[in-house]
């Protein structure tokens, strides 16, 4: 029996490749640093039954129409704003993602960015490397305290709640904003629900962890930044477009907020001459929220498990549009 053919759009850990090879003919874009060009992607998808998508390839209706043979896209990420899920569902194409496995690692990164920005760690390293450290003085490189401060979490899902659990060890007062209150979360960590504007006014640290949707695009703009304290720190570990970068640059440049820690940008990879990167009160990292060896390996394995299950007639662990699976069953057993 012919094995289904699958495309892997960037090299993944061997453990995931083993899962794929048990049931599939695997073709990998084997260039670690260089993303797969769009024309190569389309050409390979035309010959594939499924794909493991690594990175922010845009998977939309026109691309799916170019590659009708490909009926499964396994996204190696918890977010899937790079995929038009409605277009996929309309075409009977299954989308999967990798939720859960990256929760704790991403929470570590978000909390680390909070501390780094508050205590000016990157700025301090630059001062040493540039030979500008001349000695100790009472107010030299003073920052903001994390311990005992007020943390505001915008988007208290799995990752946001994991950040809150870390904050308890720092004796932080925890505020959060979701579409609706979560009494179980409040009981677990002593968190208090706030409307967005009130959270921004009260918090010393604002951590953004919402998914990118039409409603959250530009959620934090000039108006919202103006509500924050001049000593407040903003951390974005969600998606770049959730925060208006122009407004953030102006607020940081003019010291209307203290600092920012950024894992994500509007356009990635971000250009080294991006205005935000010129500011001493910005701590930036290259979208590494889930980047631990264990977590990235497990993400790749889960994506592979989703892909193999879907292509061999079994239930994938984490489908995004499970209604497609129901439609497949009807087609097979009308």
Image (spheres, rainbow, N blue to C red):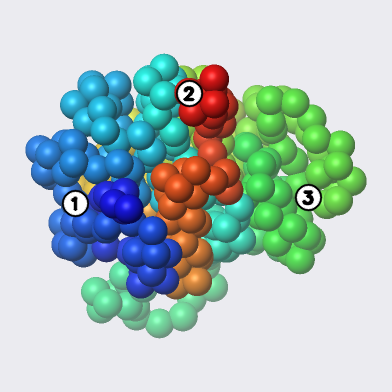
**Residue at horizontal 66%, vertical 42%?**
157
Residue at mark 1: 35
> Mark 1 or 3 closer to N-term?
1
Q: Position of residue 182 (x, y in %)?
A: 80, 35
Residue at mark 2: 331
- Mark 1 and 2 residues: CB-CB less than 8 Å, in contact? no
Foreground: disc 3 or disc 2: 2
Residue closest to the far top:
90
Whether residue 12 is visible to the viewer of this picture, yes or no, is: yes
Q: How far apart are the alpha carbons under marks 1 and 2?
A: 36 Å
Disc 3 packing (10 Å; few <14; some 14–19; many ≥20): many
Q: Position of residue 55 (x, y in %)?
A: 31, 48
Q: How far apart are the alpha carbons under marks 1 and 3?
A: 42 Å
Along the line of sight, the residue nearer the viewer: 52 or 71: 71
Q: Position of residue 69 (x, y in %)?
A: 26, 33
Along the line of sight, the residue nearer the viewer: 147 or 218: 218
Residue at mark 3: 173
SS for callout 3 = strand
């Amino acid at each position: 029996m012919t094995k289904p053919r699958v495309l892997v759009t960037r090299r993944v850990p061997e453990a995931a490749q083993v899962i794929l090879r048990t049931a599939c003919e695997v073709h990998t874009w084997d260039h670690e640093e260089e993303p797969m060009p769009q024309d190569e992607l389309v050409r390979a998808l035309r010959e594939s039954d499924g794909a493991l998508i690594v990175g922010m390839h845009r998977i939309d209706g026109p691309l799916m129409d170019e590659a009708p043979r490909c009926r499964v896209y396994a996204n190696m990420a918890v977010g899937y704003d790079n995929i038009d899920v409605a277009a996929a569902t309309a075409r009977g194409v299954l989308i999967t993602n990798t939720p859960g496995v990256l929760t704790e690692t991403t929470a570590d990164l978000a909390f680390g960015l909070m501390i780094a920005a508050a205590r000016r760690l990157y700025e301090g390293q630059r001062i040493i490397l540039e030979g500008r450290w001349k000695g100790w003085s009472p107010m030299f490189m003073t920052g903001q305290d994390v311990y005992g401060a007020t943390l505001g979490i915008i988007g208290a899902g799995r990752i946001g709640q994991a950040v809150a659990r870390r904050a308890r060890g720092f004796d932080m007062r925890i505020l959060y904003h979701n579409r609706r209150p979560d009494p179980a979360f409040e009981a677990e960590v002593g968190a208090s629900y706030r409307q967005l504007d009130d959270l921004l006014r009260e918090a010393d640290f604002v951590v953004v962890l919402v998914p990118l949707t039409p409603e959250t695009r530009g959620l934090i703009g000039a108006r919202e930044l103006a509500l924050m304290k001049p000593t407040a720190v903003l951390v974005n570990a969600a998606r770049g477009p959730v925060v208006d970068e122009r407004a953030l640059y102006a607020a940081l440049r003019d010291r209307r907020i203290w600092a920012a820690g950024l894992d994500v940008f509007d356009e990635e990879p971000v250009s080294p001459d991006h205005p935000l990167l010129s500011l001493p009160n910005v701590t930036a990292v290259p979208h590494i929220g889930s980047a631990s060896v264990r977590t990235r390996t497990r993400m790749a394995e889960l994506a592979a498990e989703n892909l193999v299950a879907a292509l061999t007639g079994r239930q994938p662990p984490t489908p995004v549009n499970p209604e497609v699976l129901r439609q497949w069953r009807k087609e097979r057993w009308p």
